[in-house]
Image (tube, grey):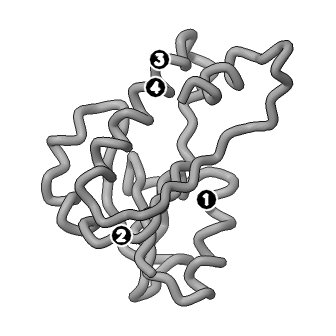
Amino acid sequence: MQILLTGVTGYIGKRLLPVLIELGHEVVCCVRDKNRFPIDGVYKNPKVSLIEIDFLKDINSSGSSLSIIKNIDVAYYLIHSMSSNVKDFGSLEEKSANNFIKLVEPTSAKQIIYLGGIANEEKLSKHLASRKRV
């Protein structure tokens, strides 16, 4: 199975990647900054490839990356836009998710796995409210 894995530099993504490799999957790791992902070190594996896409920017500028993910079966969306220096992370969450959809729509992906959060419907934090909207 060919898998697109976003958020691979985060807590869950770092732990999920070795499991996917061990299970024999081909994994395309999607990162915002290639310099933050040591593919030549720990993750050097013929079944792992790397593309650089910033989902907060227009994904059309990443045309060469589109051919790499054309035949993916599954896409993991493990991205969050929370940052201590950004006040309106909710709009960033939406923009990121919409750009992810634009990237995945023309592929052969049959499943998207989204990481949300446990939510108490009565009172949501700004972060969980934005995750719920996405």
Rounded to the nearest angstrom, the CA distance separating label 1 from label 4 is 20 Å
Q: Which of disc 3 and disc 2 is earlier in sequence?
A: 2
The tally of labels here is 4
- Left or right, residue 106 beside residue 38: left
Binning the other alpha carbons within 10 Å of mark 4 as few (below 14), some (14 to 19) or many (20 upward) gives some
**Observer-nearest of 42 and 5:** 5
Rounded to the nearest angstrom, the CA distance separating label 2 from label 4 is 23 Å
Are the residues at dot 1 and dot 4 in contact (C-beta closer than 8 Å)?
no
Q: Mark 1 sits on what residue?
A: 13
Residue 19 lies, with reference to residue 128, above or below; the image says below
Q: Position of residue 82 (x, y in %)?
A: 60, 27
Q: Mark 4 sits on what residue?
A: 94
Rounded to the nearest angstrom, the CA distance separating label 2 from label 3 is 28 Å
- Tag shown at residue 28: none
Q: Which of disc 1 and disc 3 is earlier in sequence?
A: 1
Rounded to the nearest angstrom, the CA distance separating label 3 from label 1 is 23 Å
**Observer-nearest of 85 and 97:** 97
Q: Which of disc 4 and disc 1 is earlier in sequence?
A: 1
Are the residues at dot 1 and dot 2 in contact (C-beta closer than 8 Å)?
no
